[in-house]
Image: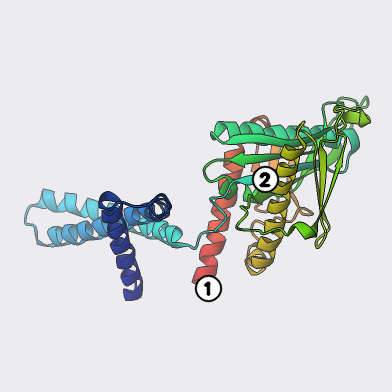
Amino acid sequence: MEVSIETHLEQIVRRYTELRDTLGGARLTGADFSRLSKEYSDLTPIVAVIDALRSARNELASLVNLAQTSEDKELQALAEDEVRTLRDRIPELEQRLRLELLPRDRDDERNAILEVRAGTGGDEAALFAAEVFRMYQRYAGLRGWRFEILGLSETGLGGLREASASITGRDVFARLKFESGVHRVQRVPETEAGGRIHTSAATVAVLPEAEEVDVRIDEKDLRIDVFRASGPGGQSVNTTDSAVRITHLPTGLVVIQQDEKSQHKNKARALKVLRARLYEMERQARDTARAIERRSQVGTGDRSERIRTYNFPQGRVTDHRINFTLYKIDKVISGEALDEIIDALLAEDQAARLGAVDS
């Protein structure tokens, strides 16, 4: 590696040591302790790879010397075997270090707001939207994340017109950020007497959850309407005006929450979703250049873009952005195999970003 890179690595190790000593000895306030602990945690995997790489290089130098100078033929042969092993391992460690040093998406550690809507396809689209929503709910459970349903608009046939949820846990947005887009399904609906395959779709949006300090909403920019909540088909489910509709006048964004019996809780949830949508608008504007770089790899994440097809007759799921196909449709829908698709997307994104750095 170049001298400038080695200097940078030494600065990282020095900062890591400073943080370790500070956290181990000084009395820190809650805010300072949290901030420094996070920085220490972020640096830990980088320093682990630096240490492993340096150790491998030092060991390689010693073994090369031993292989060249030893008069013991058996020991010399063993040293040469180890040299070959290390020469294969060192480039792998260098690649791992390059990945660790890539700039991180500042939103990766955030929680997320998930929104799923039925697309084209009538009742079948609504049924598929419900399956997609449950897929993420089960996936969240498998990863130990908290999945809080914010709103459901049901069709009465087991389908969903739209649904939203707050997902809380470790690396939520990092793992779900490439799920935004149009998810298409191809299958024979239960109501299809002729056995013909139908195509329908559901739209998924994954938004990084924003804090109040991230997005400041001026009350004068909001129009808040309250009304009586209703169930499927307009059936009244509440005798008080507890449902809340918030319109953000500058952008025209509208959020409706009616699942809680408390008007106060519905307003808080609506503001939470509105804040996430406004933050996502700012984020997309901020990351336009990066999105253009990624478009040929994992797409822009735009909700109008078809990203994945679930073909039930063939038992396959195909992600069109990276031409990745998995013949485990049942396990994907159950959330069990969703990680295989997400890992492939993340690997492709890393490769694209490494290529951008090298070019």
Is residue 60 found left or right of 179 in the rendered image? left
Residue 98 position in % (x across, y down)? 42, 62
Mark 2 and mark 1: Cα distance apart in space: 35 Å
Q: Secondary structure at mark 1?
A: loop
Mark 2: give few (<14), some (14-19) or many (20+) Cα within 10 Å: many
What's the residue type where badge 1 is placed? Ser
Residue drawn at point x = 65 percent, y = 67 percent? 286
Which quarter of the figure is the N terminus placed in? Answer: bottom left
Counting from the top left corner in percent of width and height, residue 167 is at 62, 40
The answer to whether residue 314 is seen in the rendering is: no
Q: Which residue is mark 1?
A: 359
Residue 45 in view in this figure: yes
Q: Nearer the viewer, residue 292 or 262?
A: 262
Residue corresponding to mark 2: 113
The quadrant holding residue 332 is top right
Residue 325 percent across, percent down from the top left: 66, 43
Q: Mark 1 and mark 2 in contact (Cβ < 8 Å)?
A: no
